[in-house]
Image (spheres, rainbow, N blue to C red):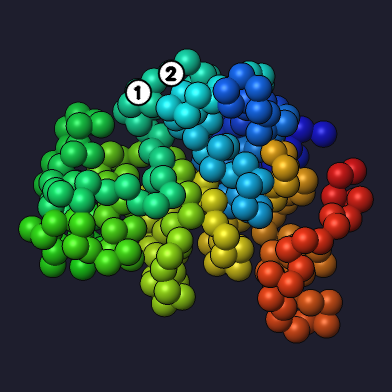
Amino acid sequence: MDAAARSPETATSNILEVRNIEVVFNHTVQVLRGLSLAVAAGSITALLGSNGAGKTTTMKAISGLLGLENGAVTGGEILFNGASTLNVKPHTLVRNGLFHVMEGRHVFEDLTVEENLTAATYARTGASARDFDRVYDYFPRLKERRKGLAGYLSGGEQQMLAIGRALVANPRIILLDEPSLGLSPLLTEEIFTIIARINAEQGTSMLVVEQNAAMAFAVATHAYIMETGRIVIDGPTERLARDPDVREFYLGIGEEGTSRDYRQVKHYKRRKRWLS
């Protein structure tokens, strides 16, 4: 059954739909195999999976960046606001309201914080000082450092800046790829608190790829879990949090409620019912 069709929301309420896509690199290497997912308008949806499962490839397929790595969507379709994104240039998708905050932050290190935010205004018309004030309201530390070079910010502050650039572009949906990568637990909690606040106050939809499954579950209402290029299980996070496989292999909680190290179980054999 199509994973997008299993979403608790109706098709008309989904801001993003990925329908049975296939992705191939260098005309030979298939990475995604019939992957489907949906993001309901105004929601936060999590996409989880081990390293190499295809999460970042999925994000790049949605935002139109596969061509930079000699990759292509060779089957299926991707709909944003009901219109196909295939063959649409990445900058056009940004102007239409789809912003991808890539893994590793990718700020302009030789520009100031303020210049980084200014660069994001080129993605839209009618940007004003109020858009900068909104970013500084969510991230007061960026206001304190607005005249400083982005390259001298801490990892957490650079992540704040990357999300701030997305906000300046006034997106309808933000794709967040590993927002907690390299951050301390305290900064990770702060970033996810702000992500939840942006969603609640701005109504911005989000698709979040995150290794910290517990943190992703804390903010998302629906989650998809990937393995080897396809979705193996999905559902409301409240239900998945009770699934014994998810608890053990993604939340690190054993059957008796004891915490377990994911590294000890990462080479597990997936239960057959995940494939049904």
Task: Using a 10 Å C-alpha cutoff, classify the residue at mark 2 as few (fewer than 14 neighbours), some (14 to 19) or many (20 or more).
Answer: few
Using residue 257 as the reference point, say whether residue 32 is left or right of it.
Answer: left
Report the disc number at residue 73.
Answer: none
Quadrant hosting residue 22: top right
Farthest-out residue, top? 87
Give the residue type at disc 2: Val
Report the disc number at residue 92.
Answer: 1
Q: What element carries label 2?
A: loop
Return the residue nearer the eye: 23 or 237: 23
Q: Is residue 11 above or below residue 218?
A: above
Q: Is mark 1 on a helix, strand or loop?
A: helix
Give the residue type at disc 1: Thr
| Tag 2 and tag 1, C-beta contact below 8 Å | yes
> Looking at the picture, how far across and down is residue 120, in whole percent?
23, 39
Return the residue nearer the eye: 229 or 14: 229
Residue receiving disc 2? 88
Q: Residue at x 19, y 56 (%)?
A: 150
> Looking at the picture, how far across and down is residue 134, in whole percent?
22, 54
> Looking at the picture, how far across and down is residue 128, in whole percent?
13, 41
Q: Residue at x 71, y 81 (%)?
A: 259
Q: Which residue is drawn at 14% across and 48% down?
A: 111
Q: Which residue is drawn at 39% across and 72% down?
A: 187
- For the question of whether residue 219 can be seen, the reply is yes
- For the question of whether residue 167 can be seen, the reply is no
Using residue 226 as the reference point, say whether residue 210 is left or right of it.
Answer: left
Farthest-out residue, left? 147
Where is the C terminus found, in terms of image quarters?
Answer: top right
Quadrant hosting residue 275: top right
Alpha carbon separation for disc pair 2 and 1: 7 Å
Using residue 195 as the reference point, say whether residue 261 is left or right of it.
Answer: right
Return the residue nearer the eye: 177 or 191: 177
Where is the N terminus found, in terms of image quarters?
Answer: top right
